[in-house]
Image: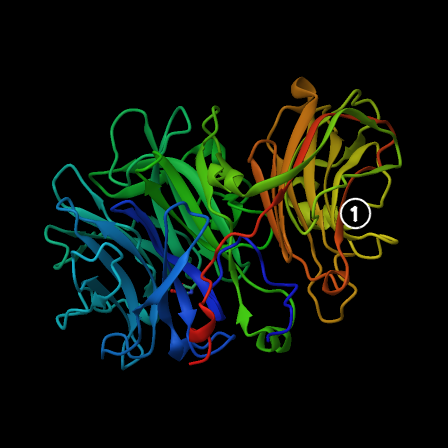
């Protein structure tokens, strides 16, 4: 029998074993959800020569059945790895994979793959046509900087387009290719977007959002009432950035909305908004026609040591799938765990109309704290004692959360949750909390933090403080909500109704032998009210469970 693995999650997507990274080709097809993912079938660590596409299917985005690999590096055009890519459903219902191969000469090229048997409802086997690559490496693009094609969309001229990351003549750029038949592709002279940076932005995603309402749109949607989001992943900061803007569907260019460009200007992705202010990368969305929503997946890697990953035999999670849409003001995305998570809810604990005094700590008992879904609203009776903040610290949320951690007494806040806490003495705990500041000109701002400094007593674990401001009008609202999903070694938090999201990895040692606790705390100077707190224990989902007899290969 295998040793109990207290780091393994209960309802997050993981293969049964080995390394996974980027989500690839998520799609709703023929009544089923598919998730492909970057997978090393040979071990728990990253290995560029061993990039395959793992493949699982689900009826509900919660329970997953593992299928055989969809792609392995077997052909001359992907001999050194099948890197990231997407799935597009053609108008006749035919799904197509578009992916980056690292070819026998180590050039990055773009390939397609088709279902071997189009009548197989599970799309188990994929064929890579021998005429690949469909897009060879362009002359002005460096060999190792041309990858991660998006889901394609159809223009009003009847041509397909996809976007892809490249470094072209030394400039980090997102290119657009067009095709009438999905086989012969031509590059648009103008890039979709370029930065002055020499760093390649990975895993681009361009998708439409409705100007109003939470409904998602098909990737080819256009017309009045449709706006677009461009998202990229930056390998130097390991963060995903996005901005809302205008996509010109004739010129195939994207212009960020001016009021969204923050700090460095719109050609520096790092000044854009963040998909998540914690530990999350390589996100990718798809349109879910079953529920008319757009859903985001993302890779959440480990932050303990490689030796630990090898000992456990696996590495990497996918974030819990999130529905996303534009906030009513049109400036930012709202993200929220897909509602199917509620099918896992079992025991419930609640606080209704409680007051948490200055220095207060209240346990939310009666449910398993290591597998929980917490939904809480904090009401702020007075902003009078808010701490002052210099405006230049607004670009510095991580550091600010470091200086003003959960145990540093403040004015309005810190208040929030302590999760994955050891019950005895709180020796180990992870704090997710808010702190309200008053800026010099009198406006208020809300900082959200996930403080990992006491998340684990184990040596060699990365324990940062994650921070982000929450774009709400606290003076008007006088309350702020927090939703937190806890799953053994991952804590995903959604502040202000999904305006600011924060994912963290935690490795508490107490969880190996004892249960984890959940608390509400307030280290501000005044009491805060908790008009509503509901917490549910979540049952384990069935995620890629391998039948006993198949376990040894
Ligand atoms: N990982 C993939 C690349 C992508 C990077 C390879 C992002 O295609 O650019 O596994 O994590």
Picture quarter containing residue 227? top left
State the residue at coordinates (79%, 49%).
403
In this rendering, position of residue 119 left or right of residue 211 = left
Q: Is the residue marked by circle 1 packed among few (<14), some (14-19), or many (20+) residues within 10 Å?
A: many
Front residue of 101 and 369: 369
Picture quarter containing residue 323? top left
In this rendering, position of residue 283 left or right of residue 502 = left
| Rendered location of residue 426, percent (x, y) | 84, 52
Query: Where's ligand 1: which quadrant?
Result: bottom left
Q: Is residue 176 above or below residue 102?
A: above
Q: Is residue 157 above or below residue 476?
A: below
In this rendering, position of residue 338 left or right of residue 424 = left
Quadrant in which the N terminus is drawn? bottom right
| Rendered location of residue 139, percent (x, y) | 23, 69
State the residue at coordinates (66%, 18%).
476
| Rendered location of residue 482, percent (x, y) | 65, 35
Picture quarter containing residue 508? bottom right
Quadrant in which the C terminus is drawn? bottom left
State the residue at coordinates (79%, 34%).
413
Front residue of 185 and 32: 32
**SS state under label 1:** loop
| Rendered location of residue 47, percent (x, y) | 45, 77
Which residue matches tag 1? Answer: 405
Q: How is the image coloured?
A: rainbow
């Amino acid at each position: 029998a295998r040793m109990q693995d207290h780091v393994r999650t209960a309802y997050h997507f993981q293969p049964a074993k080995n390394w996974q990274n980027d989500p690839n080709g998520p799609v709703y097809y023929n009544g089923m959800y598919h998730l492909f993912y970057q997978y090393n079938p040979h071990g728990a660590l990253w290995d560029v020569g061993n990039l395959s596409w793992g493949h699982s299917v689900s009826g509900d985005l919660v329970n997953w059945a593992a299928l055989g690999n969809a792609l392995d590096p077997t052909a001359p055009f992907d001999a050194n790895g099948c890197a990231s890519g997407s799935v597009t459903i053609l108008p006749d219902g035919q799904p197509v994979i578009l992916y980056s191969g690292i070819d026998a000469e180590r050039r990055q090229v773009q390939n397609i793959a088709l279902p071997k048997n189009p009548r197989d409802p599970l799309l188990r086997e994929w064929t890579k046509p021998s005429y690949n690559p469909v897009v060879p490496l362009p002359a002005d693009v460096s060999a190792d900087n041309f990858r991660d094609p998006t889901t394609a969309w159809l223009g009003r001229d009847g041509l397909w387009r996809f976007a892809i990351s490249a470094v072209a003549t030394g400039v980090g750029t997102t290119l657009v290719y067009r095709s009438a038949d999905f086989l012969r592709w031509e590059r648009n002279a103008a890039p979709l977007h370029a930065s002055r940076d020499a760093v390649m932005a990975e895993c681009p995603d361009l998708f439409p959002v409705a100007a109003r309402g939470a409904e998602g749109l098909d990737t080819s949607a256009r017309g009045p009432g449709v706006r677009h989001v461009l998202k990229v992943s930056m390998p130097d900061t390991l963060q995903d950035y996005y901005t809302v803007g205008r996509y010109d569907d004739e010129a195939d260019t994207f212009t960020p909305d001016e009021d969204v460009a923050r700090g460095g200007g719109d050609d520096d992705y790092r000044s854009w908004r963040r998909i998540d202010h914690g530990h999350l990368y390589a996100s990718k969305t798809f349109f879910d026609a079953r529920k008319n929503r757009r859903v985001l997946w993302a890779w959440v890697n480990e932050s303990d040591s490689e030796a630990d990953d090898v000992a456990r035999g696996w590495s990497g999670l996918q974030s819990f799938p999130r529905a996303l849409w534009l906030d009513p003001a049109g400036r930012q995305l709202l993200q929220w765990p897909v509602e199917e998570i509620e099918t896992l809810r079992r025991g419930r604990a609640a606080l209704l109309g409680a007051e948490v005094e200055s220095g207060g700590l209240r346990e939310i008992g009666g449910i398993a704290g290591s597998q929980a879904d917490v939904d809480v609203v904090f009401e702020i009776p007075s902003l009078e004692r808010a701490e002052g903040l210099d405006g230049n610290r607004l670009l510095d949320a991580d550091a600010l959360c470091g200086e003003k951690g959960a145990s540093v007494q403040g004015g309005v806040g810190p208040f929030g949750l302590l999760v994955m806490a050891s019950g005895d003495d709180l020796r180990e705990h992870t704090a997710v909390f808010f702190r309200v500041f008053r800026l010099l000109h009198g406006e208020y701002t809300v900082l959200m933090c996930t403080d990992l400094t006491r998340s684990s007593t184990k040596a060699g674990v990365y324990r940062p403080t994650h921070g982000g401001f929450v774009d709400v009008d606290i003076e008007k609202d006088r309350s702020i909500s927090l939703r937190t999903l806890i799953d053994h070694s991952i804590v995903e938090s959604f502040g202000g109704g999904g305006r600011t999201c924060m994912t963290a990895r935690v490795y508490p040692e107490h969880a190996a032998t004892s249960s984890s606790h959940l608390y509400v705390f307030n280290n501000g100077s005044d009491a805060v009210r908790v008009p509503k707190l509901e917490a549910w224990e979540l049952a384990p989902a069935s995620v890629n469970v391998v039948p006993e007899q198949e376990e040894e290969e």
